[in-house]
Amino acid sequence: MLEALQYATDAVSLGSLYALSALGIGLLFGVLRLINFAHGDFISVGAYGLIVPSANAMAVMYFGALPWPAVIAVIVAVVAFLALLSEAIVFRPLRGASPATMMIGSFALSFIVQNSLLLVYGSRPKAVDLWANLSRPIAVGGVRFQQLQLVTIGVTAVLLAALVLFLRRTRFGLEMRAAAEDFCMARMLGVRANRVIAMAFALSGGLAAVVSLLYVAQSGILSVQMGVPLMLFAFISTVIGGMGSLLGAVLGGFIVGILNVVLQVMLPGELRSFRDAFLFLMVIFILLLRPSGLVPVAAMKERI
Amino acid sequence: MLTQLKHYLSLLGLIVLVLLVGVLTSSVHDSQFDQSVVEFLIRMVVVIGIYLFVGNSGITSFGHIGFMAIGAYASAWQTCCPSLKPMTMPGLPDFLLRNSVPFVPSVVMSGLLAAAVALVVGMFMMRLSGIAASTATFAFLIIVNVVYSNWREVTGGTSSIVGIPIEVDVWTAVVWVVIALIGAHAFENSRYGLSLRASRDDEVAAKAAGVNVVAQRLVAFVGSAFIVGIGGALYSHFLGVLTTDTFYLDLTFITLAMLVIGGVGSLAGATVGVLTISILIDILRRLEAGVSVGGTMVSLPSGLEEILLGVAMLLILVYRPKGLFGGRTTLT
Amino acid sequence: MLLSIDNIVVHYGRLAAVRGISLEVQPGEIVCIVGPNGAGKSTTLLTVGGALSPSSGTIRFEGRTIAGAEPEEIARLGLAIVPEGRHIFATLTVNENLRIGAGMRRDRHQFAQDFERVLSYFPRLAERLRFPAGRLSGGEQQMLAIGRALLTKPRLIAIDEPSLGLAPLVVDQVYEILAELRRRENLTMLIVEQSTRRAVQCADRIYVLRSGRIELAGSSSELTGGQLLERAYFGFTGA
């Protein structure tokens, strides 16, 4: 029973991380129909922003040494800035191009960011100690949980609520929802394309920053490709959940997280290293059953 | 009639181009140049294979490098290191452990294995369209990578397989490129290719006209896997060494980029794309190694090469979003 | 002159959908563009609205060149487009749909008044403010699209096929409202219409489009009665 509760927490905590990552990708897809393969690298940049730039194997904390509200504020600002920069330099010139072109564009951006990190920080993974006190267990009602997992779940819940409020109650949110449904019509009603797109990128960057902090606190390691698995899972999550739907992205993220833990627990020892293969096999099955995703979005369906 | 002629002329033009590359390389007796050219030619085979599927079906496939991996390892199983094999790859079936297959049959067999895998997975995946299909191919790439990286007994896992006989020189590669070109050309001008392209442009209309879209896609998928598998086999017999992490995201990105940058709509576009990016990569490599300019050595700091490559690709995309070859479908 | 279109050519890829069209709209007028399918009517309207860019020619609104300008800038200049098929935001409520245009207006108090006034024109919308717009009937969606455009405080409103897909009775209602709008708001209108009968009834002047060119132009009184209109519409030339 206790074990089941622990596994459930693992699943929800991992799912939260994937849900936040998927939201970052889903936001940009909803507004721009862009799949940003560089999202994982935004996450990596957020993590590397914590340390002093150097190629040493021993990482020295820079911004990471500040009190935690400041760390969050700084890293969110850094990644949001990177996202806005990417929008201005890479994606705005490509606006209106075919989906394939935009996708290769985001791949190229990812390539550039990864190799830039490589240039500055070197290829050796670095150990980082961020908010180590969160790794200590905490007892809630007789059950021991890892604090960081509870924090992850809590942060995700708060961010989701904030996002929903933002989308439903603010002017910006209204414009983003209209743009996501029919960008051209929204513009003909005065909605400024550049503003909405910038907002989407800034939000996406902010979400990436939060994911990077939670992830680094959990894993304690920085590596140039650390964001790539997160981006892959995020992408898969958005597709399973239903591209164009933020609810779908969140749902997809949780499903992938839960499947991940379920497989980890249920696979026999020798097959454990193949866990990801099984996971992606299940993804293919889910797609065969529901190709448009679990939360189909009417605007995305083909109109005959 | 005239368009048919144009297509054949275009194919001829591409073949002549490739032959010229072979002649050029033979006359320049530079082994480093040789290596670059062979690498370029092998990439051509792979990208032609990817084009056969992506260009005709309209579905972006992230999974084809998985077929390249299958082909590469399959060829290694057949021709590699007979003395080392029982130790490095003990999980292989007996007939492979005890026998070696000559180069050319091994390449063909490797292609066939990739094609067989494509047939099996394609029967499911080709029912999907658009993003769902692309995502499924992505999942396939990851599955192949995870399986091959962990199946130590058969692939050496994350350590390299060494001792593969080096059989691919420039003219061998040229021959295979020409074969791939002819194959892709034949497909896209066959009724399969034509009806597949009809379904690419309007799936609903094609289905309404009685086109069996899933079957057409499957044919293209299997054919493309065959060619890409051959590319993988050629690659392993060029490098002599294999590791699983070669066949993952970076290679997927580069090959897709070559296709999109060249122009995803035509064989000529694919060719131009591979040529352009390969030239770029070569120039940057030489710059990084150091080039003497008027007596002094100028070289790029290491790591900058890739960044400049990425920047160059972005610039091409921004200025030619439809690809270098744009909407044109023939060389003429 | 409120709107002047001067010899524009608009391409879709290599196909020229509009091949040299010139027309003008004076303040306070109702001008109709009629023509068969594929004549280039919607293309013209979309180009005026900024969704498309002409390959050549100019479009001027209140003296300013707007050809190739961004749609959101054109909206801010006082030109509202209601495109074919309504394009209401189905997942947003009626209220939210109406308020989209508010972003570009500074005058909150005036907007509130305009909002009430628009609801008075379209009482059915007032009843359904909290509904997701996708659940409205075709006629209600058309009213929503018009009301939404009105709230951007345009000086010219261009409507593409207000009668599309609607029952004749509903179309009557829509045109009644348009006539009332013209009376009360002194709104200038450019309407694309498939039905020549409706066009002749409501418009001051009519342009007949065919295959991307203007076949005929004149006041509606000039064009009714004779067979000029039908001839131009169907492409009969000569005797």
Image (cartoon, coloured by chain):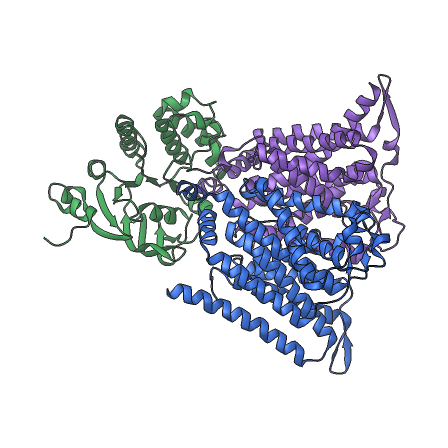
Chain colours: A purple, B blue, C green
Look at 44% across and 53% down and name the residue there: B191
Which of the pair A25/A75 is nearer the observer?
A25
Q: Is residue B139 above or below residue B80?
A: above
Q: How many marks?
A: 0
Q: Point out the image quarter for the C terminus of chain A.
A: top left
Q: Is residue B144 visible?
A: yes
Q: Is residue B53 above or below residue A242?
A: below
Horizontal side, residue B295 vs residue C145: left or right: right
Horizontal side, residue C16 vs residue C231: left or right: right
Which of the pair C31/A5 is nearer the observer?
A5
Which of the pair C131/A102 is nearer the observer?
A102
Report x, y in % for residue A275: 76, 37
Instruction: Kindly give the residue lying farthest to the bottom in the view shown.
Output: B295
Q: Quadrant of residue A270?
A: top right
Instruction: Kindly give the residue lying farthest to the left in the view shown.
Output: C239
Report x, y in % for residue A222: 82, 46
Q: Is residue B332 visible?
A: no
Look at 11% across and 44% down and name the residue there: C226
Report x, y in % for residue C38: 30, 47
Look at 64% across and 41% down and name the residue there: A25
Which of the pair B309/B96 is nearer the observer?
B96
Q: Quadrant of residue B23?
A: bottom right
Horizontal side, residue B127 vs residue A77: left or right: left
Report x, y in % for residue A60: 88, 48
Q: Is residue B251 above or below residue B40?
A: above
Q: Point out the image quarter for the N terminus of chain A.
A: top right
